[in-house]
Image (spheres, grey):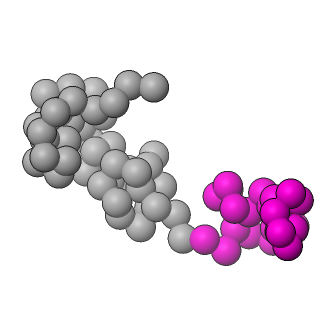
């Protein structure tokens, strides 16, 4: 569920949450490849290489202009 579907009662005006019986109205979005699928989708090229650190680092360099991914 997208964060905006949780609602925000402190917003002006308040934003109600999406009812539990309704599906999320937002399209899934992959944070890895920016595709229109969830990040855990087997359709994502990153999913096929999820244990290949060198491949991931090379893809990150290509798409983000070098450097290392930020660790949280």
Q: Who's the residue at 54% across and 70% down the image?
A: 27
* Residue 61 at x, y percent in the picture: 13, 41
The quarter holding residue 8 reads bottom right
Residue at x-position 67% and y-position 55%: 3
Task: Report the span colored magenta.
Answer: 1-26
Q: Quadrant of residue 49?
A: top left
Asked whether residue 9 is in view, the answer is yes
From the image, give the main secondary structure of the stretch colored magenta. Answer: loop
Give the side of residue 55 with respect to residue 23, left or right: left
**Toward the viewer: 41 or 58?**
58
Q: Position of residue 42 (x, y in %)?
A: 38, 50
Name above or below for residue 63 compared with residue 17: above
Residue lying at 74% horizontally and 63% vertically, measured from the top left: 5
Q: Pick the residue in front: 51 or 12.
A: 12
Note whether residue 41 is visible. no
- Residue 55: x and y in percent read 14, 35
Label tally: 0
Q: Quadrant of residue 19?
A: bottom right
């Amino acid at each position: 569920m997208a964060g905006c579907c949780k609602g925000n009662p402190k917003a002006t005006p308040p934003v109600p949450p999406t009812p539990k019986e309704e599906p999320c109205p937002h399209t899934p979005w992959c944070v890895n490849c920016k595709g229109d699928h969830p990040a855990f989708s087997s359709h994502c090229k990153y999913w096929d290489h999820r244990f290949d650190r060198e491949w991931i680092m090379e893809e990150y360099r290509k798409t983000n202009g070098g450097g290392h991914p930020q660790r949280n």
